[in-house]
Image: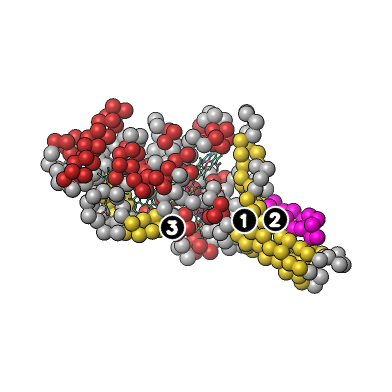
Amino acid sequence: MRDRGRCVLRVVGLCVAAVAATLLGACGGGAGSEGAQTVAAQPPSLHDDIETCASCHETIHAAWQMSRHAQSWTSETFRVASDNYRKEECLPCHAPDMIQKTGLANEPLLRDGYRSDGVTCIVCHQDAASDEWKMHGPYEADSPAHETVQNDSYLTPDVCASCHGHDAEFNQYHSWQDGTYGQQDFPCQACHMPQTEALLADTEVEKPLRWVGDHSFPGSHDDEYLKTAAKVKLKVEDGALVVEVQNQAGHFFPGGAFRTAVVDIIVDGVEVGRLEYSYENENQLESGETVTLRHELMEGAAEATARLTYYKYVVNEPGTGLVQSEVGFVIDESSLTL
Ligand code: HEC
Ligand code: HEC
Ligand code: HEC
Ligand code: HEC
Ligand code: HEC
């Protein structure tokens, strides 16, 4: 299997070189030259192809490499939380086979090898029923290296639900579906794959510019992005301090397990209240929800602050699992002179 995978890489590698040299020509997706027939005869491998995809889709590949999808197997948090990969039930979404094998929105199967590659291009795009390279995507596109299938589902959360819609700890899909964004069909991609106008492939073949989604999938590991997650507001009502925390994410906040959102209420430099929201506490904020907290003010209080901080879990001492990080990221803060 591995050798055959290498063979695909080699032949397609030649194909890439040929594209560069002749700007298209002999490499059209199957018919024609012997080399192309060899490509067509090989089932897509799950590993070496990531480098092959990168040879033409350099920009998308560079973004993907920065994503958590690229680290879903190798990340220290996963290694430790899965008890060094011993917990079998944890493995399928972190080293998945092609999602089209089980069908979009259904949980994927665990793949046989190359697990450290994580959630790759092939996992999300390859047509599992085909033994040729056949990439599903949102466009009617024409590639010298592979067939393409225009598939509107790639613009919907069905693609994401395969892995983000099953295990309760890592389930953004259901709270999205039940919430304000889901009801307006405002998809995951609109927030997590912001688009820019660019080429789909960085080849010399002349192609129109199209809208390309950011494959670095910004989420809670991106501080700038995290700032958009929630807001805190402060006001005084009938002698009490009123703190409002508004969830602006597309789903539960925090969006998954191993994260805690903490609201600190501080009056004249002294902490007078602290609330923690998390999957573990069973009190994540629903999509669109605003929680209101009240604190009775003492006479003469001069200044109040409410601060919202987001803590991720990190690896503790070897062998002892994950713990909440000591330093969090301040998402929002609001102060008021009383
Ligand atoms: C020889 C260069 C080349 C290689 C190698 C290559 N692609 Fe492409 N790919 C293209 C071109 C060219 C297009 C179409 C661009 C256009 O029409 O604007 C394309 C289009 C696509 C599309 C869009 C499909 C659609 O219908 O929206 C996807 C997805 C895709 N490629 C994924 C991959 C993956 C995954 C790999 C690795 C297995 C890969 N490509 C390897 C050149 C390549
Ligand atoms: C149904 C698919 C699925 C299964 C099964 C699954 N995960 Fe995940 N896991 C995800 C998704 C999706 C994310 C990213 C979303 C999130 O963080 O909520 C994730 C994120 C994580 C993270 C966070 C990584 C970080 O540092 O941000 C850890 C740790 C983790 N999973 C461990 C596990 C463990 C341990 C198990 C088994 C008990 C498991 N996963 C089973 C899909 C899955
Ligand atoms: C084949 C499984 C799979 C599919 C399909 C998938 N994801 Fe993921 N995703 C994961 C896993 C596993 C992680 C966690 C990686 C880690 O941190 O260890 C993850 C992480 C993420 C993160 C990063 C979260 C963070 O902690 O910063 C975002 C954002 C994300 N996915 C969005 C999406 C969106 C949007 C889609 C659909 C377009 C999607 N994913 C499709 C498996 C998948
Ligand atoms: C977690 C699933 C996932 C992974 C991994 C993934 N893609 Fe995509 N890809 C998508 C989705 C969803 C879209 C549609 C995004 C949109 O336009 O809203 C897409 C779109 C595309 C497109 C069409 C342009 C666009 O953004 O619409 C190309 C080309 C492409 N991907 C190539 C790749 C390559 C190459 C890799 C690996 C380096 C890769 N993808 C990895 C889910 C994925
Ligand atoms: C309105 C924008 C928006 C939409 C729509 C949206 N998200 Fe998010 N998402 C966010 C924000 C902001 C965060 C960061 C805060 C958090 O943890 O909730 C986030 C966090 C995440 C995370 C990281 C969770 C964690 O625990 O670290 C994942 C994974 C994710 N989203 C996946 C999805 C998926 C899958 C969908 C569609 C079903 C989706 N998102 C829809 C804004 C959005």
Badge 1 or badge 3: first in the primary sequence? 3
Quadrant housing residue 324:
top right
> Which residue in the structure is indicated by mark 2?
263
Q: Is residue 153 visible?
A: no
User: In the rendered structure, which segment of residues is drawn in magenta?
Assistant: 262-276
Residue 244 among magenta residues: no
Find the residue positioned furthest to the left: 32
Q: Position of residue 147 (x, y in %)?
A: 24, 47
Q: Is residue 3 above or below residue 132?
A: above
> Which residue in the structure is indicated by mark 1?
331
**Residue at 29% across, 37% down:** 44
Q: Is residue 216 above or below residue 7?
A: below
Amino acid at circle 2: Val
Amino acid at circle 3: Pro
Q: Position of residue 118 (x, y in %)?
A: 44, 38
Q: Residues within 10 Å of mark 1 (few under 14, many from 20)?
A: many
Q: Residues within 10 Å of mark 2 (few under 14, many from 20)?
A: many
> Which residue in the structure is indicated by mark 3?
194
- Label 1 SS: strand
Badge 2 or badge 3: first in the primary sequence? 3
**Residue at 81% across, 70% down:** 239
Find the residue positioned furthest to the right: 299
